[in-house]
Image (tube, rainbow, N blue to C red):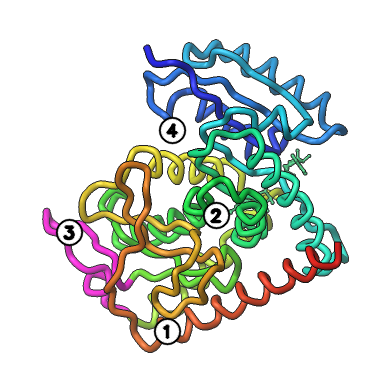
Amino acid sequence: MAEPIRIVVTGAAGQIAYSLLYMIARGEVFGKDQPLILHLLDIPPMVGVLEGVVMELADCALPLLREVVPTTDPLVGFKDVSAAFLVGAMPRKEGMERKDLLSANVKIFKVQGEALDKVAKKDVKVLVVGNPANTNALVCANYAPSIPRENFSAMTRLDQNRAASQIANKLGVSINEVNNIIIWGNHSSTQYPDAAQGKVLVKGEWKSIAEAVNNDAYLQGQFIETVQKRGAAVIGARKMSSAMSAAKAACDHMHDWWNGTAPGKFVSMGVFSDGSYGSPKDVVFSFPVEIKNKQWKIVEGLAISEFGKSKLNITSKELEEEKNEALSVLDSN
Ligand code: NAX
C-alpha cells in the first residue's frame, strides 16, 4: 500500500466538515488504496466539539484512516499537507455588512495563506469552500507566494451539481446522462449557470441540452434563478445551510483535480483568471476546465451568446469589486 498522505480540513467542527471528513476518510477522493492522515483545524472555542468529531472518526473504524490530528494552530494544521479543504470561515451574522464579512474573512485567509506558505507541501492543492470563496482563495494565494497560484481554487461545484440536477429532473434522465453544464464567475447570486454548452444522453445519443429542453425562456429564466437561489431555498426549508451537498461537491471537485476529467468532459472550478472570455484578469473566476496530471486548463473557444456575455459582465464586475474591497482591507492593516 502507498505511504499515507496528509489532508487538512478547516472548519472541522462545523456542519460541512461533519459530512466531508467521513467521505474523505472512506476513500472517495484520493482512492480506496490511499491511506490518509487527517488534520482537523478549527478555532479554540470549538476544541470540545472537535474532540467529539475525533471520537466519531475513530468509531467509524475506517481502514484508510491512519491518524487524526486535531488542532487550533495553523502551523500544525497545514504541516506537510498534500491537499487542503478550507471550509472554515466567518459566517455572516445578522446586521453584518458585506464589507465587514469580507474584512473578517480576509484576515482568516491571510493567516492561512501564510501558514500554507511556510509548512505545506509546495504542490498542495487548495480548495476554498468558505465564503466569499472566490475572494478568499485569491487572498490565500497572495499570501503563499512559494506555492504556484494554479494550486488555489474556489468551489462552484455545488452550483454545477445543482444545475445538472435541475436539467436531469426536467428531462427525466439520470444525473450521469447530463454533462458539461458551466458555472461562470462568482459563487454568489451573480453566478451564471450556463446550460447552453451542455449535453444530455437521449436514446443513446449525446444531444445539446438547449435542443433537448427546447425552451430558451426556461434556460434563461427559471433555470438560472433556481440554481442561483438554491442555497437560500435549502436554508428556508432546513433552517441550516447546505452541508451534505456542499461536502459531496467538495469531494467531487478535489476528486477530479486529483484524478483528472474524462476526455470531452469539463467541470467548473474557480481559478485565477487569465482574462479568458472577457473576464477580468487576476480574480478567481469560475470557468469550465479540463484536468490532466493534476493540472487544470480552461476550456477555450466556446461560443458565448449576447445573453451570456451580459451575465458574464455582471459577475465579473462583482468579483472586481470584491477584490478591490479585499485589497483595501489588507492595505489598512
Ligand atoms: P459552520 O458554521 O457549521 O462551520 C464553520 C466552522 O469553521 C466552525 O466550526 C468555525 O469554528 C470554523 N472556523 C471559523 N473560523 C475559523 C478559522 N479561522 N480557522 C479554522 N476554522 C474556523 O459552517 P458550514 O455550514 O460548515 O459552512 C462553512 C462555510 O462554507 C461557510 O463560509 C459557508 O458560507 C460556506 N459554503 C460554501 C459553499 C460553496 O459552494 N462554496 C456552499 C456551502 C456553504 O454555504
Distance from the alpha carbon under mark 2 to that under mark 3: 32 Å
Q: Could you say which quadrant of the image residue 57 lies in?
A: top right
Is the distance from the Cβ of mark 2 to the nearest ligand 1 atom less than 8 Å? yes
The structure residue drawn at horizontal position 38% and vertical position 26%, both measured from the top left corner, is 31
Residue 211 falls within the magenta-colored stretch: yes
Image x and y of residue 297, in percent:
35, 57
The structure residue drawn at horizontal position 39% and vertical position 38%, both measured from the top left corner, is 258
Tell me the element at label 1: helix
Q: Which mark is residue 198?
A: none
The structure residue drawn at horizontal position 40% and vertical position 86%, both measured from the top left corner, is 307
Q: Residue furthest front?
A: 146
- Look at the image and tell me whether residue 21 can be seen: yes
Q: Of the residues shown, which amino acid type is indicated by label 2?
A: Ala
* Front tag of 1 and 3: 1
Q: How crowded is the residue under tag 1: few (<14 C-alpha within 10 Å), some, or many (20+)? A: some
Q: In this figure, which residue is indicated by the disc labeled 2? A: 154
Q: In this figure, which residue is indicated by the disc labeled 3? A: 202
Q: Of the residues shown, which amino acid type is indicated by label 3?
A: Val
Tell me the element at label 3: strand
Distance from the alpha carbon under mark 3 to that under mark 4: 30 Å
**Front in this rendered view, residue 212 or 289:** 289
**Front in this rendered view, residue 306 or 162:** 306
Q: In this figure, which residue is indicated by the disc labeled 4? A: 29
Earlier in the chain: of badge 3 and badge 4, it is 4
Q: Is residue 211 left or right of residue 326?
A: left
Tell me the element at label 4: loop
What is the magenta range? 196-215
State the quadrant of the N terminus: top left
Q: Of the residues shown, which amino acid type is indicated by label 4?
A: Val
Q: In this figure, which residue is indicated by the disc labeled 1? A: 309
